Image: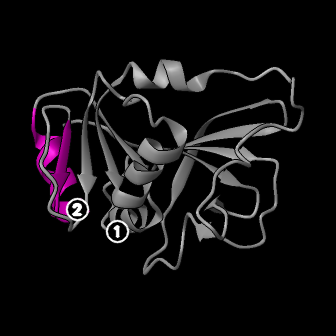
Amino acid sequence: MRKVTLFIAMSLDGYIADKDGGVDWLNGQEENGENTDTYSEFIKTIDTIIMGWNTYHQVITELSPEEWVYPEQVSFVITHREILSTERIRFTSESPCDLVKRLREEEGNGIWICGGASIVRQLMETDLIDTLHISVIPTLLGDGVRLFGPLEKEQKLRLVKTQSYNGITDLVYEKR
């Protein structure tokens, strides 16, 4: 069965985007500080990415409007919009839980839950995320899009790795 990983950054107070949906605060404490590139190693283990419409839209309009940043992976964008899929970008209205359950059974490498918060909550509620890799950014936003909202049941996790660099702390948990 394929492994499902949430790999995401959040502010110290638990937000993945500011109140306007922006992520320009995603950086360490020193402008020229040394950063560790955990993403490059992680993405080598991934062949499937799942994201919501807001995350997809932010990637193509703000973060990388000139080129698709995940050319080696198949990306599933969960949306109710009628958009023509391509070989590498597939638009679907399938529920996040049904999609993950189906993809886990297929051959392949890891599945990355890229965002957003609604998808993460649904998958957490149904116990479909195996690993949580959360980079805590040294910023307090005070308001915005919360990574974890109310959950119906307690989720027990096991801390398997930590590392800090430039004020950022990576926390890697697996479900127990």
What amino acid does circle 2 point to?
Cys
The residue at 74%/46% (across/down) is: 137
Left or right: residue 12 versus residue 10 is right
Q: Position of residue 40 (x, y in %)?
A: 51, 19
Helix, strand or loop under label 2: helix
Is 52 inside the magenta-drawn segment? no
User: Which residue corresponds to mark 2?
Assistant: 97
What amino acid does circle 1 point to?
Gln
Among the 4 quarters of the image, the one containing residue 142: bottom right
Q: Position of residue 109 (x, y in %)?
A: 25, 26
Q: Position of residue 6 (x, y in %)?
A: 45, 46
Q: CA distance from mark 2 to mark 1?
A: 7 Å
Q: Residues within 10 Å of mark 1 (few under 14, many from 20)?
A: some
Q: Position of residue 165 (x, y in %)?
A: 79, 28
Seen in the picture, residue 23 relative to 47 is either above or below; the reply is below
Task: Out of 123 and 33, give the one closest to the viewer.
Answer: 33
Q: How many marks?
A: 2
Left or right: residue 93 versus residue 44 is left
User: Which residue corresponds to mark 1?
Assistant: 122
- The magenta span reads 89-106
The residue at 42%/24% (across/down) is: 43
